[in-house]
Image (cartoon, helix red, strand yellow):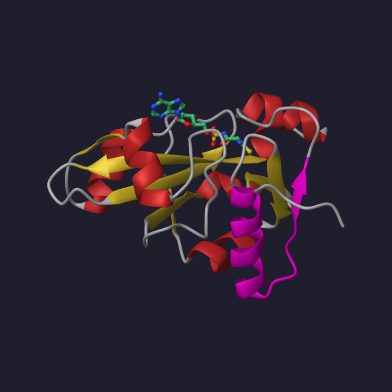
Amino acid sequence: MKQLKRSAESVQKALERAGMGLEVVELPASTRSAKEAAFAIGCKVDQIAKSIVFRATESDRAVMVVVRGSHRVDEGQVATAVGEAIEKATPDFVREATGYAIGGVPPCGHLHPVLVLLDEGLRDFEALWAAAGTPNAVFSLTPEQLVELTGGRLLDVVVR
Ligand code: 5CA
């Protein structure tokens, strides 16, 4: 099998530790954004599970919100769920908290434990695709597997 890039390999290792049979795929085209990923995979944009990192401003904790590709996070609802104000993380904060750069941030296998919130809307599809460490790597999973893999709380956190 072809050698994965280092960041994609560390996601593959995390998936193996989870023991769910999930596998990282590296694609020739960019999967940096949800739109590009959907095009490269040949799936709907909403089947892309976008992992967006916020910073809880009091505790300095990282909060990851996973939503469907075309959805926008309602930051007010996230703040309520977390119990403190949040702000969009800077690229440096994202890298320090998760170990990955924007465009490849996976929903699991982070450098430090990250609080994960999952949007209910992710349950509308049987197959989802998430980033796997690099802007060319993804993996497919079901919404149930996403819940198990991340230990994330399912709630309504998108703008309607
Ligand atoms: N690889 C694809 C999907 S498989 C991916 O990672 N897409 S994503 O949507 O989950 O990640 C990109 C997200 O990073 C954007 O939705 C945006 O919320 C965030 N982002 C992009 N640029 C910045 C930036 N400069 N600062 C903070 N966050 C950013």
- Magenta span includes 23: yes
Q: Quadrant of the C terminus?
A: top left
- Say which quarter of the image contains residue 69: top right
Residue 46 in the image: x percent, y percent?
Answer: 65, 35
Near-viewer residue (71 or 90) = 90
Please, which residue is most extreme toward the left here? 58
Q: Quadrant of the N terminus?
A: bottom right
Residue 148 visible in the current orientation: yes
The boundaries of the magenta stretch are 6-26
Dominant SS type (magenta):
helix
Residue 135: image x %, image y %?
Answer: 63, 34
Between 99 and 65, the residue placed more toward the observer is 99
| Image-based side of 145 in relation to 93, left or right | right
Quadrant of the rendered image containing residue 16: bottom right
In the image, residue 156 sits, relative to residue 27, either above or below, namely below
Which residue: 52% across, 58% down?
108
Q: Residue at x 40, y 42 (%)?
A: 95
Is 157 on the left-hand or right-hand side of 29? left
3 vs 1, left or right, is: left
| The one of 149 and 160 positioned closer to us in this rendering | 149
Residue at (42, 50) in percent of width and height? 98
- Which residue: 61% across, 74% down? 17
What is the total number of numbered labels drawn onto the structure image? 0
Q: Is residue 92 above or below residue 132?
A: above
Q: Is residue 13 magenta?
A: yes
> For this view, does 63 lie left or right of residue 59?
right
Q: Is residue 123 visible?
A: no
Residue 39 position (above or below residue 8): above
Relative image position of residue 76 (x, y in whole percent): 26, 36
